[in-house]
Amino acid sequence: MINIALVDDHALLRNGLAGVIDSFDNFNVVFEADNGKHFIRLLKTNPKPSVVLLDINMPEMNGFETALWIKNNEPNIKILVLSMMDDDSSIIKMLHYGIKGFILKDSKPAVLRKALEEVTE
């Protein structure tokens, strides 16, 4: 089973994503956080995820800051960005922060599944 953490400030989106991901074979959502600071706190008391599905725009600690923290503190955790921001500068910046993939929030579940599979290969 591949453990996934969801980090997005929209609870309804996280809950829906958790249901979709839990329906995929071999994937399990271990926790959900509403920003990077919350993710770091939950990381101390929950199973460590193999993959973080990370939004960019969040309060307190955004996706850029969270990706950089993961790169510096938990480099074995893979990051898959799920965002509405698709401008080149945001994607390039996230690539420098160690992300392994990027998909848009309006992607179909099959695209999400393929991205998770590719990130964890």
Image (cartoon, rainbow, N blue to C red):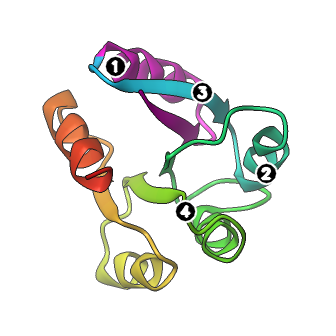
- Going from N to C along the chain, the mark reached first, 4 or 3, is 3
Q: CA distance from mark 4 to mark 2?
A: 15 Å
The residue wearing badge 3 is: 30
Which class describes the residues within 10 Å of circle 1: few (<14), some (14-19), or many (20+)?
A: some
Q: Quadrant of residue 8?
A: top right
Which class describes the residues within 10 Å of circle 2: few (<14), some (14-19), or many (20+)?
A: some
Tell me the SS state at disc 2.
helix
In-image side of 26 versus 65 (left or right): left
Magenta part of the chain: 1-23
Q: Name the disc covering residue 20, or none.
A: 1
Q: Residue at x 27, y 19 (%)?
A: 25
The residue wearing badge 4 is: 76
Query: Looking at the picture, does residue 36 appear above or below residue 48?
Result: below
The residue wearing badge 2 is: 40
Q: CA distance from mark 4 to mark 3?
A: 16 Å
Identify which amino acid the numbered label 3 is placed on.
Val
Identify which amino acid the numbered label 1 is placed on.
Val
In-image side of 8 versus 41 (left or right): left
Identify which amino acid the numbered label 2 is placed on.
Ile
In-image side of 100 versus 57 (left or right): left
Tell me the SS state at disc 4.
loop
Q: Looking at the image, how many numbered discs can be counted on the residues? A: 4
Q: Residue at x 40, y 53 (%)?
A: 83
Q: CA distance from mark 2 to mark 3?
A: 14 Å
